[in-house]
Amino acid sequence: MSSLQPNVAVIGAGCAGLAAAARLAEYGVPVTLFEASPHLGGRARGVSWKTLSLDNGQHILLGAYSETLRLLELVGSKPEDVFLRMPLQLHMHRELKLNTCPILPAPLHILAGLLLAQGLSIGERFAAIRFMAWMKLKGFRLEEDETLDALLQRKQQAARLTRLLWEPLCLAALNTPVAQASAQVFLNVLRDSFAGKRADSDMLLPRCDLSSLLADPVATYIERQGGRVLRSAPVATLNKPDNFLVETEDGARESFTHVVLATSPFRLQPLLQHFPSMVEYVRTVSQFEYQPIYTVYLQYPQSFRLGGPMMGLASVEGQDDLHSQWVFDRGWLCNQPGLLAVVISAEGHHQKLTQQALAESVASEISGAFPHLPQPLWHKVIAEKRATFACKPGMARPSQITSVPGLFLAGDYSTDGLTANLYPATIEGAVRSGVQCAEYILRDIGRKQE
Ligand SMILES: Cc1cc2nc3c(=O)[nH]c(=O)nc-3n(C[C@H](O)[C@H](O)[C@H](O)COP(=O)(O)OP(=O)(O)OC[C@H]3O[C@@H](n4cnc5c(N)ncnc54)[C@H](O)[C@@H]3O)c2cc1C
């Protein structure tokens, strides 16, 4: 521990950095949050378009996102105001209707949902229930990680069941195709969502843009607690001659006792070049692969409403695969009548299309599903090409504690070293990592007991 008064730099104001800075500010630790962009929130941020507040991508949260919900409550947001909370349901247009049963305790609410699901054969329902029972029996732990595809085949989940149930869940949770996805991380998500309290499996759909939901209120809280939030302040170099020296691109320098590096993994390397002992960490993240998420916004006449706030579209066997996976009605959610957000997770043929061609193709898929729809009035495609790391079996992920005392890595990719805690790239994974880094610092400076 340094002899100086503690003074922490958090570099990067995505969910991880915001969560780390808020936890430190909560305990009265002087903290400065550096963000390269003029906007906070990183990969979960609002985007202004025409007169509307869109998002860089439509996000879904889960009732199991305990640290995210705690953070929102800390900064004075009421989850019941900012989210539409719905019991888990999977509506794949014309193919599958699965509603969990809100009055039964977990996991019976899921089993009842599977038993009563419309669109699955009896054999498919029982295969899914057998698989859920097996996961529970095993404590959601695999002896060795493998791809989800391999596990589903081993557990005799038929191709149609995978296409309608497991694949959409895997893409939504891991943003990685089943043929590449880590079965263990998928099981971790199912455990947290299905094996705890019933409300853990609820879906939380934001009622406002993501900046208004998270980044802005958290930043306001940090400042109210005496912390500093610096926008358009990209950190150019990080060094440790004695204390940590943080230099921003405009040449301003400041010294800190601790640093939380909360950039996305692909921005780590230049900031770690003065730390020879961090070479292994840099090598580990350089091996990451990334998966895209595209969101296609389509504006229809304001009178149009989907049958619910969200719906899945499944490809029909034997026909060309649809690009569109999930459709969200921003009229239901954010009071933006007639605006649909169509989400396409993970890699696919859509990446080869121009944005214009993709928007037209998605609009034609939507009018195939809802035949009376007119042409959209306008469209806007937001392509996040490195939306998340590809969550693959057994991938090495760097730990939050590093080889440099006082330097911590926060981000949806970093871990506390426990397999059971491995999460995919999500808001909750990012928030948990940020909170964990702040906890290490609080213990280091004696504000909390070991
Ligand atoms: C389109 C899309 C849809 C998604 N959907 C979901 C979903 O439905 N549910 C869910 O839970 N998750 C979803 N995710 C994932 C989730 O958004 C991310 O996992 C999470 O936001 C990552 O947060 P982070 O803090 O780890 O990283 P980031 O958000 O990448 O934050 C890093 C920050 O560091 C800043 N930075 C970089 N370099 C510097 C520097 N040198 N100096 C200062 N600042 C710097 C960046 O500008 C950025 O703001 C989605 C992601 C995308 C892109």
Image (tube, rainbow, N blue to C red):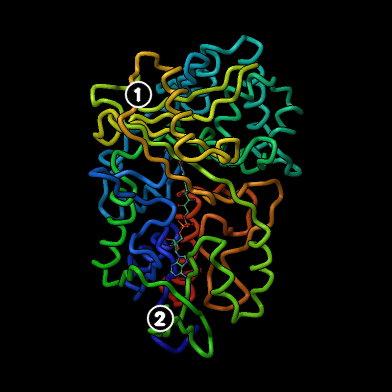
Residue 241: give x, y in percent of width and height.
53, 90
Q: Is residue 272 left or right of residue 198?
A: right
Looking at the rendered structure, the kind of residue marked 1 is: Gln
- In-front residue for pair 177/22: 177
Residue 267: give x, y in percent of width and height.
54, 65
Looking at the rendered structure, the kind of residue marked 2 is: Pro
- Mark 1–mark 2 CB contact (< 8 Å): no
Q: Is residue 299 left or right of residue 235?
A: left
Residue labelled with disc 1: 375
Q: Earlier in the sequence, mark 1 or mark 2?
A: 2
Task: Tell me the distance, in whole angstroms, between the alpha carbons under discs 1 and 2.
Answer: 58 Å
Q: Is residue 192 left or right of residue 279?
A: left
Q: As displayed, is residue 127 above or below residue 29?
A: above
Callout 2: 10 Å neighbours few (<14), some, many (20+)? some
Q: Residue at x 58, y 46 (%)?
A: 291
Q: As displayed, is residue 15 above or below residue 132?
A: below
To which quarter of the image does residue 318 belong?
top right
Q: Residue at x 42, y 75 (%)?
A: 9
Residue 310: give x, y in percent of width and height.
39, 27
Residue labelled with disc 2: 6
Question: At numbered mark 2, what does the secondary structure look like: helix, strand or loop?
Answer: loop
Residue 124: give x, y in percent of width and height.
64, 15
Tally the marks: 2
Mark 1 or 2, which is nearer the eye? Answer: 1
Q: Is residue 21 left or right of residue 156?
A: left
